Amino acid sequence: MTYKEEFIKFMVECGVLKFGSFTLKSGRQAPYFINTGNYKTGAQLARLGKYYAACIEEHGLSADTLIGPAYKGIPLAVAASIALFNDYHKELNYCFDRKEVKDHGEGGLFVGKSLEDGERVILIEDVMTSGKALREMLPKIEASSKVQIVGMVISVDRMERGLASDLSAVQEVDKEFGVKVYSIVNMNDIISAIERGVIGGKEYLPAMKAYRETYGVNI
């Protein structure tokens, strides 16, 4: 079983990936739902970090620091940095942003590694829906220093076009900011995992494929 298949099975076991009929924030009726808020134990977080680290390694991303946008990105960046050290003997810094600048003590907008000009960074997030987190984070990073954003790593690429564009959120971010987004898995991987029997849910395959045909984008 590949690490991608293991991750999909892991999401189902954690109740993060569910199948059925769900009304999304966009108003679309989807046959699946991803709720990363269902990760809630130390053991789950440890495994999650390993999958992020494996994705970083798979794509040959080399960086100095992992940035976890508050709030969901914070534990993800920490877990990924630990896994990179334990599994690949790579020691990376990590940091995360405050919601407002601290004006006492050490001050500043970031907690953890202080960003420096020329530093190579990877942003770590959960699921990209609209690119809002990146759009909010970029001004903070640019105000701090002139870093090189190597890429952004997320858990799932829904491969779904936005409401106002024929591009997915991942494609829009690349086009608008030149930031490459790498996902541990995408919707095609999930459909394939069902077809191969890695996870259950074959009864949802027709609806999954129909949804993909209606709202999906090519990569």
Image: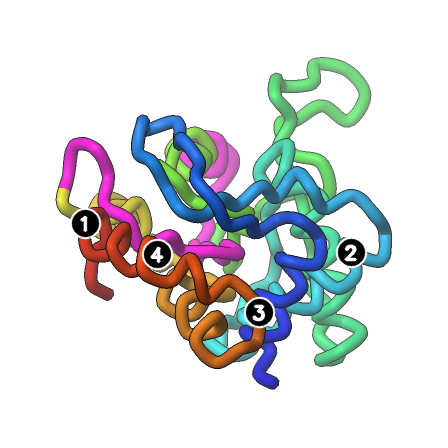
In x, y percent, where is residue 113?
69, 46
User: In front: mark 2 or mark 4?
Assistant: 4
Residue position for label 4: 208
Distance between the alpha carbons at the discs numbered 3 and 2: 18 Å
**Mark before the other along the chain sequence, 1 or 2:** 2
Distance between the alpha carbons at the discs numbered 4 and 1: 10 Å
User: As shown in the figure, which amino acid type bears the numbered disc 3?
Assistant: Ile
Residue position for label 3: 199
User: As shown in the figure, which amino acid type bears the numbered disc 1?
Assistant: Thr
User: In front: mark 1 or mark 2?
Assistant: 1
Distance between the alpha carbons at the discs numbered 3 and 4: 14 Å
Residue position for label 2: 44
Contact between labelled residues 1 and 4, with CB atoms less than 8 Å apart: no
User: As shown in the figure, which amino acid type bears the numbered disc 2?
Assistant: Gln
**Mark before the other along the chain sequence, 4 or 1:** 4
| Mark 4 neighbour density, 10 Å: few (under 14) some (14–19) many (20 or more) | many
